[in-house]
């Protein structure tokens, strides 16, 4: 019998890691582990693990990453497990001459602790910055909002909620979303904090790319995310640099509906420091085609409320066990829908995106094999 879609989605980071390593061994994949010093919520060791399926000297490589934003790993790992169990798709990759590099738990701390950020409250998708060189991006709107976003008490008071609503009424929902989520580098305890130096998990990912992806001439990358957009819809977000040729290639692979943040066509704001940009330094001779696959969960305001609660909990470790449970559950619910219909939509769209990437890679460059 075929497994149900729900069976692919893990219940914890510890369970997910154990399963990933077991599935990689079953497939005979090349496995490497990249630990961090922080410990997990169950006292477990934390690491980003990789599985290379296929020839290490293949000209073409497809990367799939999970848990760039920790708690989003429940979905991303599910997509990876479904692919590892998809014998026809694995055969298709072999026939196309494409190796698969699955990167499990880019941010293992956030996955384990039910947080979007790492052990230093750093958003890894805002952290790939030239620290110590070019001045960091400025987000003046965030400073005005920070005291409102992280109130002294949780749940927030009626007065606090009115103040937030007043800000949105005066500035507009779009300005609110920009100020909150574009990334900021001034409030280390705040939302969407990009850090003051490269985070340990980001350094690990750079090393993974340098050691396991650099040799491949053509690279596709699907980074699985959750949160933004209509429930269950997987928005295909271009994740590369401002290069019209790369945008055109991404559209050729994944369709004309691929969203481009810097063109204003995405549910995501236009950010800098996104971790997919590491590919340009780590694999300078490769031709990359990059996409974030973002599955919608709940409305944006609910996501912001959940993130506010999670940051409040980080600042108040003495919170009651009941309040802690409520905040963690709200955080998980904001980024993962434990429902059959959502699981089915996620896995169906993920499979299509993988197949499209394989077709794009198969047609890339000299010596491309014949279509199968």
Image (tube, helix red, strand yellow):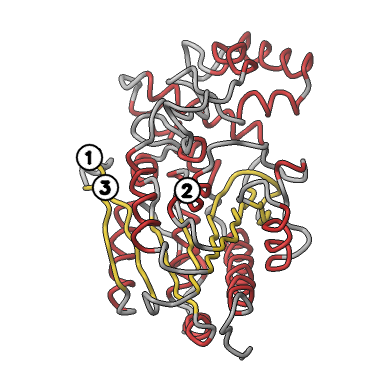
Q: Is residue 189 left or right of residue 320?
A: right
Q: Nearer the viewer, mark 2 or mark 1?
A: 2
- Residue that mark 3 sits on: 46
Q: Is residue 45 left or right of residue 184?
A: left
Where residue 138 appears, as percent x and y from the top left, is 59, 21
Q: Residue at x 77, y 58 (%)?
A: 257
User: Element at badge 3?
Assistant: strand
Of labels 3 and 1, the one closer to you: 1
**Front residue of this view, candidates 223 and 369:** 369
- Circle 2 sits on which residue? 278
Q: Is 372 positioned to the left or the right of 113 in the image?
A: right
Under tag 2, what secondary structure? helix
* Disc number placed over residue 167 in the picture, else none: none
Q: Check whether the beta carbons of the residues at disc 3 and disc 1 lie within 8 A of each other.
A: no
Residue at the top extreme, as displayed = 159
* Residue drawn at the location 45% of the way across and 69% of the way down: 216
Residue 37 disc label? 1
User: In terms of depth relative to the viewer, which is nearer, 97 or 231?
Assistant: 97
Specify which label sits upstream in the sequence, 2 or 3.
Answer: 3
Classed neighbour count for the residue bearing mark 2: other residues with Cα under 10 Å, few (<14), some (14–19), many (≥20): many
The residue lying at 28 percent from left, 50 percent from top is 47
- Tell me where residue 367 appears, x and y as whole percent: 56, 84
Q: From the viewer's side, name the closer residue of 45 and 196.
A: 196
Is 245 above or below relative to 122? Answer: below
Label 1: state its secondary structure.
strand
Upstream in the sequence, badge 3 or badge 1? Answer: 1
Point out residue 129 in the picture as x, y percentages from the top left corner.
Answer: 48, 34
For disc 3, the neighbor class at 10 Å (few under 14, some 14 to 19, many from 20) is: many
The answer to whether 322 is drawn above or below residue 155 in the figure is below
Q: Are marks 2 and 3 in contact (CB under 8 Å)?
A: no
């Amino acid at each position: 019998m075929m497994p149900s879609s729900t069976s692919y989605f893990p219940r914890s980071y510890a369970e997910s890691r154990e399963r990933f390593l077991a599935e990689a061994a079953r497939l005979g994949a090349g496995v490497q582990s990249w630990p961090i010093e922080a410990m997990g919520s169950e006292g477990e060791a934390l690491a980003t693990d990789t599985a290379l399926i296929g020839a290490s000297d293949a000209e073409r490589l497809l990367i799939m990453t999970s848990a760039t934003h920790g708690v989003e790993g429940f979905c991303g790992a599910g997509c990876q497990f479904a692919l590892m169990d998809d014998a026809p798709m694995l055969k298709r990759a072999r026939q196309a001459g494409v190796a698969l590099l699955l990167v499990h738990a880019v941010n293992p701390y956030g996955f384990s602790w039910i947080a979007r950020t790492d052990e230093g409250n750093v958003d890894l998708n805002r952290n790939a910055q030239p620290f110590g060189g070019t001045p960091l991006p400025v987000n003046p709107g965030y400073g005005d909002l920070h005291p409102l976003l992280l109130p002294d008490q949780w749940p927030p008071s009626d007065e606090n909620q009115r103040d937030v609503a007043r800000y949105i009424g005066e500035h507009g929902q779009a300005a609110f979303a920009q100020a909150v989520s574009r990334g900021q580098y001034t409030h280390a305890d705040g939302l969407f904090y990009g850090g003051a130096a490269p985070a340990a998990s980001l350094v690990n990912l750079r090393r993974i790319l340098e050691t396991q992806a650099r040799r491949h001439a053509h690279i596709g990358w699907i980074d699985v995310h959750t949160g933004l957009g209509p429930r269950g819809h997987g928005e295909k977000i271009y994740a590369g640099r401002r290069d019209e040729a790369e945008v055109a290639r991404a559209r050729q692979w994944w369709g004309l509906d691929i969203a481009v943040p810097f063109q204003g066509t995405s549910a995501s704001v236009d950010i800098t420091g996104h971790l997919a940009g590491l590919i340009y330094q780590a694999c300078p001779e490769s031709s990359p085609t990059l996409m974030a696959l973002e599955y919608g969960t709940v409305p944006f305001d609910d996501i912001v409320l959940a993130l506010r609660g999670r940051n409040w909990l980080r600042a108040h470790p003495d919170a009651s066990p009941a309040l802690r449970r409520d905040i963690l559950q709200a955080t998980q619910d904001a980024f993962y829908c434990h429902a059959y219909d959502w699981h089915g939509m996620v896995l169906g769209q993920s499979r299509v995106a993988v197949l499209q990437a394989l077709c794009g890679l198969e047609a890339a460059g000299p010596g491309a094999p014949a279509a199968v």
